[in-house]
Amino acid sequence: MELVTKEPIIPPAIPAPSSPLKPLDRALENPRGETNVYIRGLMPETSDEMLETWGRRFGDIKSSKSIIDHVTGMCKGFGFVRFHNYKDAENCIRGFHHLGYEVSFARESFYSKLKAIADDHNTNLYVSNLPKSMNEHELGNIFAPHIVCSARILRNTNGTGRGVGFAR
């Protein structure tokens, strides 16, 4: 684990009170061949640049992002590093795990799942952060004066809106 001791030193993890550290073999499970690594336990002072520097020691990275609270301007304690290949991502997981970080391959986000199945010729718009009380007519009116062929609000089993919908 000499990569972990390189300068600048990666600080010890700030442990999450609610979740115990999972074993390394579970952290390395990667059925989809993912290269994006989720890292939790970062200091509030962690910047995008710091996370990128720490990630680069394990291999060639595509991107990195520490998740910042927009109110405080501080890191929320977690971030992501995406590598060009899964071996470098595995080395990153091993290194950060050795330092006590909660680390694993990132789960695919809902947005990236939608993007993967997207049809470039489709004119469906996915709309989020809608009021739970919004109906289809109100969703269609958002896009006036453009013509909306159809609008649909996703609802829970009890009929209340889920805050997302589609307009075509």
Image (cartoon, rainbow, N blue to C red):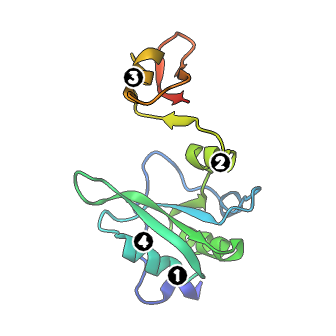
- Mark toward the start of the polypeptide (1 vs 2): 1
Q: Nearer the viewer, mark 4 or mark 2?
A: 2
- Mark toward the start of the polypeptide (1 vs 4): 4
- Mark toward the start of the polypeptide (2 vs 3): 2
- Identified at 43% across, 73% down, the residue is 51
Per the image, the residue denoted by label 3 is 141
Q: Which quadrant holds residue 90?
A: bottom right
Q: Secondary structure at mark 1?
A: helix
Q: Amino acid at mark 1?
A: Arg
Find residue 56 and name its label: 1
Give how far across and how far down residue 25 sits, in percent.
71, 62
Q: Is 74 rendered above or below residue 114?
A: below
Q: Amino acid at mark 3?
A: Asn
Classed neighbour count for the residue bearing mark 2: other residues with Cα under 10 Å, few (<14), some (14–19), many (≥20): few
Q: Secondary structure at mark 2?
A: loop
Whether residue 38 is visible to the viewer of this picture, yes or no, is yes
Per the image, the residue denoted by label 4 is 12
As measured in the structure, the alpha-carbon distance from the residue carrying label 2 to the one carrying label 3 is 24 Å
- Mark toward the start of the polypeptide (4 vs 3): 4
Per the image, the residue denoted by label 2 is 120
Q: Secondary structure at mark 4?
A: loop
- Identified at 65% across, 48% down, the residue is 120
Q: Nearer the viewer, residue 107 or 2?
A: 107
As measured in the structure, the alpha-carbon distance from the residue carrying label 1 to the one carrying label 4 is 18 Å
Q: Nearer the viewer, residue 163 or 125?
A: 125
